[in-house]
């Protein structure tokens, strides 16, 4: 399984690169696969490559789901077992 993380393009750089913000973390990524992406656009990034442009609603929904998954992993093991037993 691959994980693509939404980020917002801050600026286009030379050589097919862009500075992208991932909820406060800024990285330089390749936009070779998304040449139409401009500052302000949201992109889905996997291993340093922006693979697709996405709309802001989709980006925020994905970020919310990732936050929920991280929060679930941080719960004490006992709470996870109790929740699984209820299903």
Image: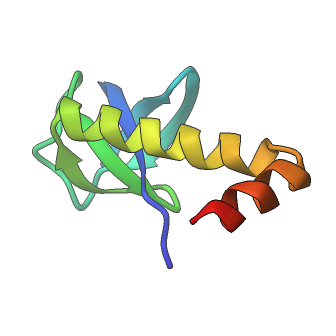
Q: Position of residue 28 (x, y in %)?
A: 50, 39
Residue sitting at x 45%, y 46%: 29
Q: Quadrant of residue 77?
A: bottom right
Which of 46/32 is in front? 46
Residue sitting at x 80%, y 43%: 75
Which of 64/41 is in front? 64
How many numbered dots are placed on residues in this image?
A: 0
Residue sitting at x 43%, y 31%: 19
Q: Residue furthest left?
A: 36
Tell me: residue 64, above or below residue 78: above
Left or right: 41 in relation to 75: left
Residue sitting at x 30%, y 50%: 31
Tell me: residue 29, above or below residue 21: below
Which of 82/49 is in front? 82
Tell me: residue 29, above or below residue 41: below
Q: Position of residue 56 (x, y in %)?
A: 21, 30
Q: Is residue 31 visible?
A: yes
How are the residues colored? rainbow
Q: Is residue 14 visible?
A: no
Q: Quadrant of the C terminus?
A: bottom right
Q: Position of residue 27 (x, y in %)?
A: 54, 36
Q: Residue furthest bottom?
A: 1
Left or right: 47 in relation to 82: left
């Amino acid at each position: 399984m691959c994980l693509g993380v939404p980020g917002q393009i801050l600026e286009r750089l030379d050589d097919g690169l862009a500075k992208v913000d991932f909820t406060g973390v800024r990285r330089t990524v390749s936009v070779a696969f998304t040449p139409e992406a401009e500052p302000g656009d949201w992109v889905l990034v996997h291993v340093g490559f922006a693979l697709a442009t996405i709309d802001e609603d989709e980006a925020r929904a994905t970020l919310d789901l990732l936050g929920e998954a991280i929060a679930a992993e941080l719960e004490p093991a006992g709470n996870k077992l109790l929740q699984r037993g209820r299903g």
